[in-house]
Image (cartoon, helix red, strand yellow):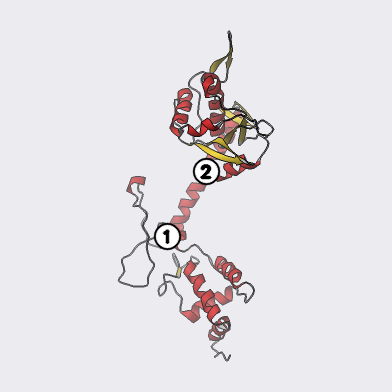
Amino acid sequence: MLNELRILAASENAESELLDFKREYTPQKKAAFWAEIVKDIVAFANTRGGVIVFGVEDDGSPSGFDCSMLFSLDNAALVDQVRKYTDHNHHGLHVVSIQRGLKALPAIIVEPVSTPLVFAKVGTYETEPGKQKTAFSIGTIYVRHGSKSEPCSRGDLQGWIERELARVRDQWLGNIRKVVEAEPGSTVVVLSPSQVPSASPVRLTSDPNAPVVRLQKLSDGYPFRQSDVIAAINKRLNGLAAINTHDIQTVKAYLGVTPDKTPNLVHRPHEKASPQYTAEFIDLIVSSFEKDHDFFMRCRCSWRGQEYEG
């Protein structure tokens, strides 16, 4: 998401639900400046996240103001400004550099929150002697409505609930898939983040005496399904040959590729699951063809019980 916001900030010339422009950076105005900035930060966080670019007019053109002082603002100081008005430490705030044209401009990237931020302090500041403006009031929740930061409505809250439910559902389905693909008889163990061992590199081997190391996710070691293998091989062969699903079966039989004999090439979580393959399996097939352009024909003939005569 952070990379997408960087691209948006560098290329778009119109403010939106995800993007806001500020013509200048004036922290010396204190309450007046920070109340408005925090309002936008909170609105972005309560919606889908977003980015605020400084030194840009509303139409996307350069403002001409020097906003480079923002680069020296520590992320922690930015978090403190938000906490002053919300009583919450939102650590998903990042001061970054955005390249717009030939100039590098400072920007604040805001990550979304799982629970809406509510203002715990009034955002009132003086506009001129004897006159005040209130950016937000205590107890209000701000969100992005197009290019504006405004108080939320019932529909906004409903939208936030639906997005959060979708996020949780995707997380649950991902965890369910891990259980479904687990080998029969496997035990599900729940660990806290502090109990999860740190990742360390391992080498796949067919040595029966090697210590057993189970991958946390099948995709960590066997990321390719059969269709992925075929697509990758045909791309690398670059028109010199083309294989299909039948060829994969003949190659496996010819080379003796099975989950038991060659776990460095293929794995099958359980009997009813489709096999998944490693990058090494793809490399083996491509190198075999490069050494012998009749390789696939030999595999097909071997599959039919015939002897190939080149």
Q: Nearer the viewer, residue 83 or 272?
A: 83
The reply, left or right, for residue 12 in relation to residue 212 is right
Query: What residue is rendered at 55% in x and 19% in y?
Result: 32
State which mark lies toward you, 1 or 2: 2
Name the residue that disc number 1 marks: 182
The reply, left or right, for residue 3 in relation to residue 264 is right
Q: Quadrant of residue 215?
A: bottom left
Across and down, in percent, residue 47 comes to: 57, 34
Label 2, secondary structure: give it: helix
Badge 2: residue crowd in 10 Å (few <14, some 14–19, many ≥20)? few
| Residue 111 in view of the camera | no
Residue 266 circle label: none
Name the residue that disc number 2 marks: 167
Of labels 1 and 2, earlier in sequence is 2
Badge 1: residue crowd in 10 Å (few <14, some 14–19, many ≥20)? some
Amino acid found under the numbered disc labelled 2: Arg
In this picture, is 175 found above or below 121? below
The reply, left or right, for residue 238 in relation to residue 305 is right
